[in-house]
Image (cartoon, grey):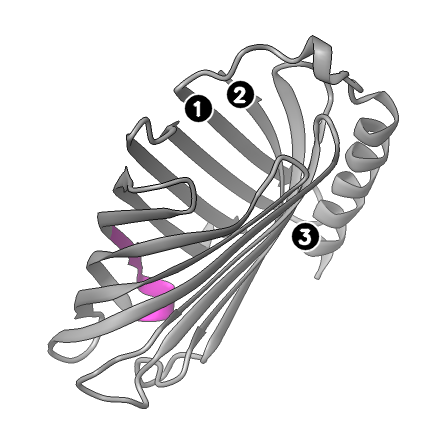
Amino acid sequence: MVLQRALTGAATFFLIFGSMTGPAVGAEDKPAARPWSGSAGLAFLATSGNTDTQTLGLDLAFKRVPEPWGLDFTANYLRSEDSGITTAERYGAKLRGQRSLSERWAVFAGLSGERDTFSGYDLRGVVEAGGTYTVLPGPTHTLAFDCGLTWTKEDLVTGPTNNSLGALAGLSYTWKPREGTQLSEHLVWYPNFDETGNWRATSETAFQAALSERLAVKLSYEVRHYNQPVPGFDKTDTTTKASLVASF
C-alpha cells in the first residue's frame, strides 16, 4: 500500500508538471515521419530506514511503420523486493511482424515469451497470426482491432506443461489531445479452444505527457486476469507504474 501511494504521488506530480510544460507543436513544426522509432522506460523506487523496499521496472520498444512491411518489438522487466525478499518478478519479450494490405487492413504474425513464477508460470510462449482492421487512422484518435489464432505453451510452476490452440481478440485505442500528450488503452482477450473455461485477458491503460522533445513521464495501470489460474494462485494481478520514458 505504501509503495502504491508513493508511485501514485510521484506520477501525479510529474503528470501535472509534464502537462504544464510539455511542448505544444503546431502541424507546420512536426518533423517528417520516420519508419523506425524506439523508446526506453525506467521506473525505480527505493526506501530505507523503517522500511526497506526496492522496485525496478524496465521497458524497451522498437517499431517500424508498415511500408508495407512493419515490425514491433517490446521487452519488459519488473522486480520488487521487501527487506531483501523478492515479492514480484516478471519479464518477457514479444516480436510481431506486419504486412499492410491497404490503408485500413493488415496481417500479422508474432512470437512472445514470458516468465512470471509469482503467477504460477515458469514460461508461457505464444505463437500468433491474424489480421488488423483500423477504424480510426488518427492523428488525434487511433482505433484498431486485432483478431487471430494462437498456439500457447505453458510450463507451470506446479503441474504438467500445457499446450493449447486458441485465439486472440484485441483492441488498441490512442487519444492525443495535444502534441506530446496521449491516453491509450490496449485490451486483449485470449480464448482457449481446448478448454473453454481456461481463458485469460490483459488490459493496460496509460497516460503519457512530454517533458521535452525526447523525454516523457508515463503512468500505467495493468490488469491481468486468468479465469482458471494455476492452483494456489489468484485470478487477477494488477500493476501500477510511473516511468520516465526516453524516445529515440
Quadrant of res 211: top right
Q: Pointers 2 and 1 in contact (CB under 8 A)?
A: yes
Location of residue 20 (image quadrant): top right
**Label 1 element class:** strand
Cα separation between marks 2 and 1: 6 Å
In the rendered image of this protein, does residue 103 appear above or below residue 165? above
Q: Position of residue 114 (x, y in %)?
A: 28, 54
In the image, is residue 121 above or below residue 8?
A: below
Q: Amino acid at mark 2?
A: Ser
Amino acid type, residue under disc 1 in the picture: Gly
Tell me residue 207's x, y (percent). Answer: 68, 44
Q: Amino acid at mark 3?
A: Leu
Q: Is residue 212 left or right of residue 84?
A: right
In front: label 3 or label 2:
2
Q: Which residue is mark 3?
A: 3
Where is residue 100 drawn, in percent x and y?
Answer: 31, 39
What residue is shown with label 2? 247
Give the numbered dot on residue 38: 1
Looking at the rendering, the stretch of residues picked out in magenta corresponds to: 113-120
Counting from the top left corner in percent of width and height, residue 167 is at 27, 71
Q: Residue furthest right?
A: 20
User: What is the C-alpha distance between the residues marked 3 and 2?
Assistant: 27 Å
